[in-house]
C-alpha cells in the first residue's frame, strides 16, 4: 500500500508543490505558527534520503569530484555573478533588491533536491554529498560572496547558521549513512517503503508552511512585484540550464546529469528566507521569498523535461543493447 502511495505521490509532485504553496498563502495566519516544524521536517526528509547512501558511496563521489566541483561552480560563482548582472540591469541603483538577488543565488543547494533526484532516478550519493559539503561551506561562502559582490561587510551569525544547518542536514545524513553501513544496506528495503511517501508529504508540509510565512510579502501586488518574480524565475531557469549544458559538455551519465541539474537549479530557500528576514531590510527579503514561491513549480517543470528525455532515450538504449 505504501509503495502504491509513493508511486502516486511521484506522479502528483508537479501538482502537490504548487497546491501546497497556494494552501500556505491562503492559510497564512493558521500555518505560520508552525514554522518551528520546518527544521524537523527537513531533518526527516534528509534522513529518509540518506539511508540509501553508504560511506563507500560518499568516498566514491570524492574520488571523482568533477560533478561536485561543477555544481559548486554553478552555485557559488556563476549564478551569483549572473544575479548581480541581472539586478543591475533590471533595477539599477536599487541596492537592496540587487542584494536580494545575489543572496537568492548564493545560498546553498536545496535540501529537497534529493527528493526530485530520487524521483527521476538520479545519483543520490552525489546529491547528498553536494548537500553535505555545500552546507558545511555555506556559513563561510555566503557572507563571503555577499561581501565581495555587494561591496560592504555583511554581518551574519555564522555560528548560529552552521549549528542550525548542522542539526538539520549533517546529523540526520550521518545517522542514515551509519544505519546503511550497520545493516549492510538492508535498511533501504525495510525502512525505505515506509519513509519514502512520508518524506514527500513532509516536503509538501514544508512548502505549505513556507507559503504561509511569505504570505505578507505577496499582498502588495504590483507590476514591480511581477518584474521581481520574472527575474527570479529566469535566474532559476539559468541555473537549471547551466546544469544541463555542463553535464552534456563533459559527457556525464544520466544519473549524474539529473543530480547536477536539480542541485544547480534549486536552493535552500527556507534558509535563505530566514537569513534575509533576520539580517537584512525587508526589500532584500522579497526576491528570496519569491524564490520560495516558484522553486518547487520550476522543479516540477524541469522534472517533466527530464522524464521526457529519459523516455525518448529508452528505445535507443534497448536497440543498442540488442545489437
Image: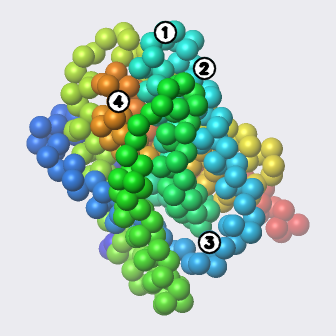
Who's the residue at 38% across and 11% down the image?
224
Tag shown at residue 280: 4
How many residues crowd mark 1 within 10 Å: few (<14), some (14–19), many (20+)? few
| Residue denoted by label 2 | 85
How many residues crowd mark 2 within 10 Å: few (<14), some (14–19), many (20+)? some
| Residue denoted by label 1 | 93
Who's the residue at 23% across and 38% down the image?
213
Callout 2 secondary element:
helix
Mark-to-mark CA distance, 4 and 2: 20 Å
Residue 243 vs residue 159, the one in the foreground: 159
Left or right: where 258 falls relative to 315: left
Q: Earlier in the sequence, mark 2 or mark 1?
A: 2
Residue 103 vs residue 130, the one in the foreground: 103
- Residue 102, percent from left and from top: 51, 29
Q: Quadrant of residue 317?
A: bottom right
Mark 3 against mark 1, which lies toward the viewer?
Answer: 1
- Residue 71, percent from left and from top: 65, 48
Q: Earlier in the sequence, mark 3 or mark 4?
A: 3
Q: Residue lying furthest left in this view?
A: 30
Q: Earlier in the sequence, mark 2 or mark 3?
A: 3
Q: Earlier in the sequence, mark 3 or mark 1?
A: 3
Left or right: where 296 falls relative to 279: right
Quarter of the figure that contains the C terminus: bottom right
Tag shown at residue 58: 3
How many residues crowd mark 4 within 10 Å: few (<14), some (14–19), many (20+)? some
Mark 2 against mark 1, which lies toward the viewer?
Answer: 1
Amino acid at each position: 500500500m505504501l509503495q502504491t502511495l509513493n508511486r502516486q505521490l511521484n506522479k502528483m509532485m508537479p501538482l502537490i508543490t504548487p497546491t501546497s504553496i497556494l494552501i500556505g498563502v491562503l492559510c497564512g495566519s493558521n500555518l505560520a505558527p508552525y514554522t518551528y516544524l520546518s527544521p524537523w521536517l527537513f531533518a526527516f526528509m534528509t534522513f529518509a534520503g540518506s539511508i540509501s547512501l553508504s560511506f563507500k558511496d560518499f568516498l566514491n563521489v570524492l574520488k571523482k569530484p568533477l560533478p561536485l566541483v561543477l555544481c559548486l561552480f554553478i552555485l557559488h560563482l556563476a549564478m551569483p555573478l549572473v544575479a548581480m548582472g541581472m539586478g543591475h540591469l533590471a533595477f539599477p541603483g536599487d541596492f537592496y533588491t540587487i542584494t536580494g538577488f545575489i543572496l537568492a543565488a548564493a545560498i546553498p543547494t536545496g535540501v529537497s533536491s534529493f527528493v526530485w533526484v530520487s524521483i527521476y532516478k538520479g545519483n543520490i550519493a552525489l546529491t547528498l554529498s553536494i548537500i553535505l559539503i555545500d552546507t558545511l561551506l555555506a556559513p563561510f561562502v555566503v557572507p563571503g560572496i555577499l561581501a565581495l559582490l555587494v561591496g560592504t561587510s555583511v554581518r551574519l551569525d555564522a555560528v548560529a547558521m552552521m549549528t542550525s544547518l548542522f542539526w538539520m542536514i549533517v546529523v540526520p545524513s550521518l545517522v542514515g549513512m551509519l544505519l546503511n553501513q550497520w545493516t549492510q544496506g538492508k535498511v533501504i528495503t525495510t525502512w525505505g517503503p515506509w519513509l519514502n511517501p512520508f518524506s514527500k508529504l513532509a516536503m509538501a508540509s514544508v512548502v505549505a508552511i513556507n507559503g504561509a510565512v511569505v504570505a505578507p510579502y505577496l499582498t502588495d501586488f504590483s507590476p514591480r512585484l511581477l518584474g521581481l518574480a520574472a527575474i527570479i524565475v529566469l535566474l532559476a531557469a539559468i541555473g537549471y540550464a547551466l546544469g544541463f549544458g555542463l553535464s552534456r559538455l563533459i559527457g556525464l551519465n544520466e544519473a549524474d546529469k539529473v543530480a547536477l541539474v536539480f542541485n544547480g537549479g534549486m536552493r535552500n530557500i527556507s534558509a535563505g528566507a530566514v537569513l534575509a528576514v533576520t539580517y537584512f531590510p525587508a526589500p532584500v527579503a522579497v526576491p528570496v521569498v519569491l524564490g520560495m514561491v516558484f522553486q518547487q513549480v520550476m522543479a516540477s517543470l524541469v522534472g517533466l523535461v527530464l522524464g521526457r528525455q529519459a523516455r525518448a532515450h529508452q528505445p535507443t538504449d534497448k536497440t543498442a543493447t540488442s545489437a
